Amino acid sequence: MNTRKKGNIAEEKACEYLKQKGYKIVERNFYTKFGEIDIIAFKDDVFHFIEVKSGTTFEPIFNITPSKLKRIIRSAEYFIKQNRIDSAFCIDAIIVKGEIDHFVNISF
Protein backbone atom coordinates (compact mmCIF):
# COMPACT_ATOMS: atom_id res chain seq x y z
CA MET A 1 0.00 0.00 0.00
CA ASN A 2 1.43 3.38 -0.96
CA THR A 3 1.98 6.27 1.43
CA ARG A 4 -0.89 8.39 0.07
CA LYS A 5 -3.38 5.54 0.46
CA LYS A 6 -2.21 4.95 4.05
CA GLY A 7 -2.60 8.68 4.68
CA ASN A 8 -6.14 8.66 3.30
CA ILE A 9 -7.09 5.75 5.56
CA ALA A 10 -5.65 7.57 8.59
CA GLU A 11 -7.56 10.75 7.66
CA GLU A 12 -10.80 8.77 7.35
CA LYS A 13 -10.26 7.28 10.81
CA ALA A 14 -9.46 10.75 12.18
CA CYS A 15 -12.66 12.20 10.68
CA GLU A 16 -14.77 9.42 12.17
CA TYR A 17 -13.12 9.99 15.55
CA LEU A 18 -13.78 13.74 15.36
CA LYS A 19 -17.43 13.26 14.39
CA GLN A 20 -17.90 10.89 17.35
CA LYS A 21 -16.46 13.61 19.60
CA GLY A 22 -18.92 16.22 18.30
CA TYR A 23 -16.73 18.04 15.78
CA LYS A 24 -18.17 19.25 12.48
CA ILE A 25 -15.85 18.59 9.54
CA VAL A 26 -15.61 21.85 7.58
CA GLU A 27 -13.06 20.89 4.94
CA ARG A 28 -10.49 18.24 4.10
CA ASN A 29 -7.20 18.57 2.28
CA PHE A 30 -7.20 22.36 2.11
CA TYR A 31 -4.30 23.42 -0.12
CA THR A 32 -2.53 26.78 -0.16
CA LYS A 33 0.80 27.95 -1.53
CA PHE A 34 2.13 27.42 2.00
CA GLY A 35 1.06 23.80 2.34
CA GLU A 36 -1.89 21.56 3.11
CA ILE A 37 -4.18 21.22 6.09
CA ASP A 38 -5.51 17.67 6.40
CA ILE A 39 -8.73 18.46 8.26
CA ILE A 40 -10.49 21.66 9.28
CA ALA A 41 -13.09 21.03 11.95
CA PHE A 42 -15.30 23.16 14.19
CA LYS A 43 -16.45 22.58 17.77
CA ASP A 44 -17.52 24.85 20.62
CA ASP A 45 -16.96 28.03 18.58
CA VAL A 46 -13.34 27.06 17.81
CA PHE A 47 -11.86 26.14 14.44
CA HIS A 48 -9.39 23.25 14.63
CA PHE A 49 -6.75 22.95 11.90
CA ILE A 50 -5.65 19.35 12.16
CA GLU A 51 -2.55 17.55 10.93
CA VAL A 52 -2.99 13.78 10.71
CA LYS A 53 0.00 11.48 11.02
CA SER A 54 0.17 7.70 11.11
CA GLY A 55 2.76 4.99 11.40
CA THR A 56 3.54 1.70 13.06
CA THR A 57 7.32 1.57 13.41
CA PHE A 58 8.00 5.08 14.69
CA GLU A 59 6.37 7.93 16.59
CA PRO A 60 4.48 9.91 13.92
CA ILE A 61 4.23 13.02 16.11
CA PHE A 62 7.92 13.65 15.45
CA ASN A 63 7.10 14.28 11.77
CA ILE A 64 5.41 17.53 12.80
CA THR A 65 8.50 19.70 12.79
CA PRO A 66 8.67 23.41 13.63
CA SER A 67 8.83 24.23 9.90
CA LYS A 68 5.80 22.00 9.19
CA LEU A 69 3.91 23.68 12.03
CA LYS A 70 4.79 27.10 10.61
CA ARG A 71 3.36 26.08 7.20
CA ILE A 72 0.17 24.81 8.87
CA ILE A 73 -0.23 28.09 10.76
CA ARG A 74 0.26 30.15 7.58
CA SER A 75 -2.29 27.98 5.76
CA ALA A 76 -4.73 28.35 8.68
CA GLU A 77 -4.31 32.13 8.62
CA TYR A 78 -4.97 32.09 4.86
CA PHE A 79 -8.17 30.05 5.38
CA ILE A 80 -9.33 32.43 8.13
CA LYS A 81 -8.70 35.50 5.98
CA GLN A 82 -10.21 33.95 2.84
CA ASN A 83 -13.39 32.99 4.69
CA ARG A 84 -13.56 36.14 6.86
CA ILE A 85 -13.69 34.09 10.04
CA ASP A 86 -13.85 35.91 13.35
CA SER A 87 -13.49 32.97 15.70
CA ALA A 88 -10.87 31.35 17.88
CA PHE A 89 -8.68 28.70 16.29
CA CYS A 90 -5.99 26.22 17.21
CA ILE A 91 -3.65 23.76 15.57
CA ASP A 92 -4.19 20.10 16.52
CA ALA A 93 -2.50 16.82 15.69
CA ILE A 94 -4.19 13.46 15.40
CA ILE A 95 -1.93 10.44 15.54
CA VAL A 96 -3.32 7.19 14.17
CA LYS A 97 -1.26 4.30 15.44
CA GLY A 98 -3.64 1.47 16.24
CA GLU A 99 -5.56 3.77 18.58
CA ILE A 100 -6.09 7.48 18.00
CA ASP A 101 -4.39 10.20 20.02
CA HIS A 102 -5.68 13.77 19.68
CA PHE A 103 -3.37 16.59 20.73
CA VAL A 104 -5.26 19.88 20.94
CA ASN A 105 -3.52 23.26 20.46
CA ILE A 106 0.00 22.05 19.73
CA SER A 107 2.96 24.39 19.54
CA PHE A 108 6.76 24.33 19.62
Image (cartoon, helix red, strand yellow):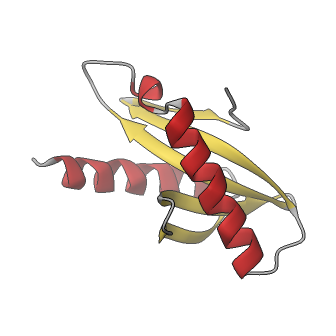
Q: Residue at image x 85%, y 57%?
A: 44
- The answer to whether residue 34 is left or right of residue 77 is left
Residue extending farthest left: 1
Q: Residue at image x 90%, y 71%?
A: 86
Q: Quadrant of the C terminus?
A: top right
Residue extending farthest top: 58
Residue 61 spot, x, y in % from top left: 47, 27
Residue 74 spot, x, y in % from top left: 64, 56
> For the image shown, how many numbered marks are present on the structure?
0
* Residue 4 sits in quarter: bottom left
**Up/down of 62 relative to 4, above or below:** above
Residue 29 spot, x, y in % from top left: 45, 66
Q: Nearer the viewer, residue 21 or 48?
A: 48
Q: Residue at image x 39%, y 20%?
A: 59
Q: Residue at image x 66%, y 60%?
A: 76
Residue extending farthest bottom: 83
Residue 52 spot, x, y in % from top left: 46, 45
Q: Nearer the viewer, residue 98 or 32?
A: 32
- The answer to whether residue 73 is left or right of residue 45 is left
**Up/down of 42 relative to 101, above or below:** below
- The answer to whether residue 4 is left or right of residue 102 is left
**Up/down of 27 relative to 6, above or below:** below
